[in-house]
Amino acid sequence: MFGDNCPLVVTPAQLHNFKASEPSSSDLVILDASWHMPNSPRKADAEYLASHIPSARFLDIDRVASPHPLSLPHMMPDPETFVDACSKFGITPETHVVIYDTHGVFSSPRALYMFRAFGHHRSSILDGGLLGWQSHGGQTESGASENVQSTEYPTPSLIKDVVKDYEQMVANAELNPATNAGAFYVLDARPRGRFLGVDPEPRPGLSSGHMPYAVSLPFSAFVETHTVPEHIASKITDKLPLNYTRLRSNQAILAALEDALGADRAQEVLEGRRPIVTSCGSGMTAGILWLGLKLLGVERVGLYDESWTGYAMRKESKIVKGE
């Protein structure tokens, strides 16, 4: 349907049309990339088995990942791990991969970031996720996906500068972006109370606060909450919340970016004169900010893979509390 110009985001109607017109299963692969916070009682894999978009496969973001010295979860996989997952899912370089989650827009952008970082541009998220799909009349099925024909996905290379590590973030934190043109801006997607250091982190023993010169932009500024219509909700037997998130308009995303950075600095980013990096608690919701920036046409945008957990776990890290 889209060829090489796959959009970052597709609607339920577009996915329905694509499913109806696909010549073969290898042309479209749908992935459920749902993920829940470690302290949540919800289990993404069990929810997938109970209900998912027909023919969808389950992408366990914590398993399709590289090991980390600090045992951090869902780190960017190495090329071999990515290839193994794509091959088992029946994905080829020509496959349009559509990714969704059960929150609406929460963990799917992180999975999309992974595909795009490895140069698989035929990839999108489903706006509204599973509940958005159901709200627009989409059907679901249960059980594991069957008869998946494995493929031989070629080993890709990671696109330069899309993944930032601890050393790069520490070096950047020594530079005041107001006076040093070599510094990149850092957007922190965590709730503002955690950014300021007045609210605790969900991970026990981890200090809240933020990196020097980082800017607070909670991921909630890029999404809005919707409710499943009553006539649809009455037919949903899954034990899922009936509220879900969708992306805000590009105009609203731009307004949130300008409110956080200021109009002049936002313009620097939009025009490609200054790189920008997103961060969050563990590298998950930073994907939402990454996606919003990409929707605005920002090219020079990276993501701090370890995010706050990796940064704050190290005793030598400089932590700022307050503004």
Image: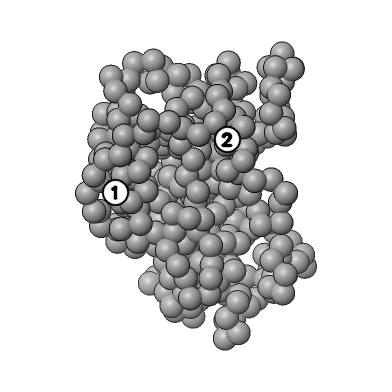
> Which amino acid is tagged 2?
Leu
> Which residue: 55% across, 24% down?
141
Residue 292 can be seen in this image: no
Label 2 SS: helix
For marks 1 and 2, the one nearer the N-term is 2
Q: Residues within 10 Å of mark 2 (few under 14, many from 20)?
A: some
Q: Quadrant of the N terminus?
A: top left
In the rendering, at what x and y percent does residue 46 appear? 62, 41
In the rendering, at what x and y percent does residue 268 appear? 42, 56
Q: Quadrant of residue 148?
A: top left
Label 1 SS: loop
Up-down relation of residue 51 to residue 219 (above or below): above
Q: Is residue 99 left or right of residue 139?
A: left
Up-down relation of residue 32 to residue 23 (above or below): below
| Label at residue 119 | 1
Q: Is residue 159 left or right of residue 288?
A: left
> Which amino acid is tagged 1?
Gly
> Which residue: 45% across, 27% down?
55
Q: Quadrant of the C terminus?
A: bottom right
| Foreground disc of the pair 1, 2 | 2
> Which residue: 59% across, 30% down?
51
Up-down relation of residue 41 to residue 16 (above or below): below
> Which residue: 47% across, 44% down?
59
In the rendering, at what x and y percent does residue 305 appear? 47, 63
Residue topped by disc 2: 49
Q: CA distance from mark 1 to mark 2?
A: 30 Å
